[in-house]
Amino acid sequence: MRVVLFICTENRFRSQIAEAYFNKYAPKGWRAISAGLEPADEIHPNALKLMLEEGIDISGKKPRLLTIDIQRGVDVAIIVCSGYTCPVVFAKHVEKWNLPDPARMPLREARKIRDEIKSRVLDLIRRIKENKIRFIKSNETC
């Protein structure tokens, strides 16, 4: 099984949404996980609402800490957060999406971020299916 790791600071909004979309539409033989640098205690309520609008229930998910163990065997790492706190990531391919944090946005604005995440995840899946991901990087930082 090949693995995509979505990373953000608290692992309570952007990375959880990206993980859920990827797993819903994942190519055969792929799955997604997510983690954060400073995990929150729970998923953000608006993330739950926004994903339920899409028919995806993430209420059973819990934020988790990004560790070296989680990164073992990761093929693709996507850093979804923006700002100055970025991890060193060990993966065969790393991308930085630099998405703003929707946690403090009104639901209407957060919905735009959710839709952007969905669009990027679907594009990532397309690139995976078309073998357009280059698996050469061993570590990356932003």
Image: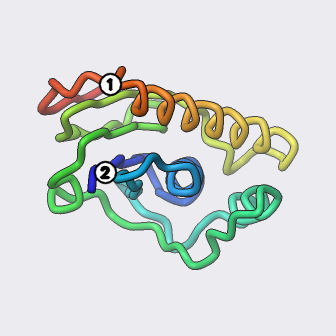
SS for tag 1? Answer: loop
**Residue 127 vertical position relative to residue 9 in the rendered view, above or below:** above
**Quadrant, the N terminus:** bottom left
Residue type (three-letter) at the residue carrying disc 1: Ile
Q: Is residue 129 left or right of residue 60?
A: left
Q: Which residue is mark 1?
A: 133
Tell me which corner region of the image, top left, top right, bottom left or bottom right, holds residue 13: bottom right
Q: Is residue 19 left or right of residue 78?
A: right
Q: Amino acid at mark 2?
A: Val
Residue 115, percent from left and from top? 72, 38
Marks 1 and 2, how far apart in space? Answer: 13 Å
Horizontal relation, residue 99 to residue 36: left or right: right
Instruction: Determine the image quadrant of residue 119.
Output: top right
Name the residue tied to disc 2: 3
Query: In the drawing, does residue 85 fall left or right of residue 67?
Result: right
Is the C terminus in the top left, top right, bottom left or bottom right quadrant?
top left
Badge 2 density bin: few <14, some 14–19, many ≥20, Cα 10 Å:
some
**Residue that lies at the very extreme toward the left in this rendered image:** 138
Q: Secondary structure at mark 2?
A: strand
Q: Residue at x 48, y 36 (%)?
A: 125
